[in-house]
Amino acid sequence: MRFGAFIFPLLALGAGGYFGYHLQTGEHGLKARADLERRKEVLEGELAGLHEVKQRLERDVALLRPESLDPDMLDERARALLNLAHPDDLVMMKRRAPDPTGPLTKR
């Protein structure tokens, strides 16, 4: 048998192996695509949360516009910003979760 008869099939097999490997693990390969799909799902969830925050803020801003000023909303925002309460208000304080490192450990 001639050695030349094996050169083309070996080169074709080598090129196929090279391209197959990079198809699977390359920068634009199947693994990279799967990683991008997972990242896309995470970012879509984050975007949905940001849309909810935006809608809430738009609603709050609409309540503070001069043509539709809500006195309760204005009072609530003023008290929150100034950190004040009316003498007749009932203030309920939230209890914080205990610090897992403890108060006496160095950080």
Image: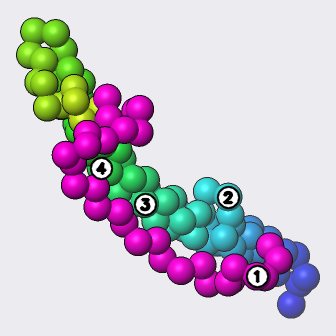
Q: What coloring was used for the rendering?
A: rainbow
Question: Pointers 2 and 1 in contact (CB under 8 A)?
Answer: no
Q: Is residue 98 above or below residue 69?
A: below
The secondary element bearing badge 3 is classed as helix
Q: CA distance from mark 2 to mark 3?
A: 20 Å
Q: Position of residue 96 (x, y in %)?
A: 46, 71
Q: Position of 28 compared to 2: left or right?
A: left
User: According to the image, label 1 marks what residue?
Assistant: 104
Q: Is residue 52 above or below residue 71?
A: below
Task: Examine the rendering and report whether any part of residue 19 can be seen.
Answer: no
Q: Amino acid at mark 1?
A: Leu
Indicate the quadrant containing the N terminus: top left, top right, bottom left or bottom right.
bottom right
Q: Amino acid at mark 2?
A: Glu
**Which one is in front in this view, the residue at disc 2 or the one at disc 1?**
1
Q: Is residue 97 magenta?
A: yes
User: According to the image, label 2 marks what residue?
Assistant: 27
**Which one is in front in this view, the residue at disc 2 or the one at disc 3?**
3
Q: Quadrant of residue 106?
A: bottom right
The secondary element bearing badge 2 is classed as loop
**Which one is in front in this view, the residue at disc 4 or the one at disc 2?**
4
